[in-house]
């Protein structure tokens, strides 16, 4: 399996997000090694990070819907990756706990400014 990425387009709506996750799941059929699965998992993580990378205006319903869709599709895709891992006989330990992947221990959307200041993320 080539190391090319399936994530090429900008995701303007939920259909784009669903389409990209479907492409990743379709590529699972060709995944024959742990490295192939890890590459697909990284693309899945990228999708969740992209939709959660910036604060959301309370009135931005489309972004909220896009995030919800991404969260559901992320979990669905990770389960498929783990099934494929079992099928090809490699360890199936990919996590669908997206909240800890995205925050690395910090709270999302700037709620933990004190921790951000201590590591130099926030300028004063």
Image (cartoon, helix red, strand yellow):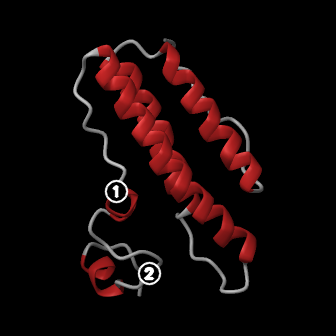
Mark 2 to mark 1 CA distance (whole Å): 20 Å
* Picture coordinates of residue 52, whole percent (x, y): 53, 64
Q: Are marks 2 and 1 in contact (CB under 8 Å)?
A: no
Q: Residue at x 34, y 19 (%)?
A: 87
Foreground of the two, 79 or 95: 79
* Picture coordinates of residue 97, whole percent (x, y): 34, 56
89 lies left or right of 40? left
User: Which image quarter: residue 80?
Assistant: top left
Q: Which mark is residue 110?
A: 2
2 or 1: tag closer to the N-terminus = 1
37 lies left or right of 109? left
Label 2: which secondary element: loop
The C terminus - image quarter: bottom left
Q: Residue at x 73, y 85 (%)?
A: 59
Q: Residue at x 72, y 55 (%)?
A: 14
Label 1: which secondary element: loop
Q: Which residue is mark 1?
A: 97
Of tags 2 and 1, the one toward the viewer is 1
Vertical relation: 29 (above or below) 15: above
């Amino acid at each position: 399996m080539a190391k090319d990425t399936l994530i090429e387009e900008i995701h303007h709506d939920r259909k784009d997000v669903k389409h990209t996750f479907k492409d990743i799941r379709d590529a699972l059929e060709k995944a024959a090694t742990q490295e192939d699965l890890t590459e697909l998992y990284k693309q899945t993580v990228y999708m969740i990070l992209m939709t959660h990378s910036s604060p959301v205006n309370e009135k931005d319903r489309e972004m909220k819907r896009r995030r919800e869709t991404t969260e559901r599709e992320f979990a669905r895709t990770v389960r498929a990756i783990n099934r494929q891992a079992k099928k090809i006989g490699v360890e199936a330990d990919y996590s669908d706990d997206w909240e800890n992947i995205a925050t690395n221990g910090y709270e999302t959307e700037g709620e933990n400014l004190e921790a951000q200041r201590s590591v130099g993320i926030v300028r004063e």
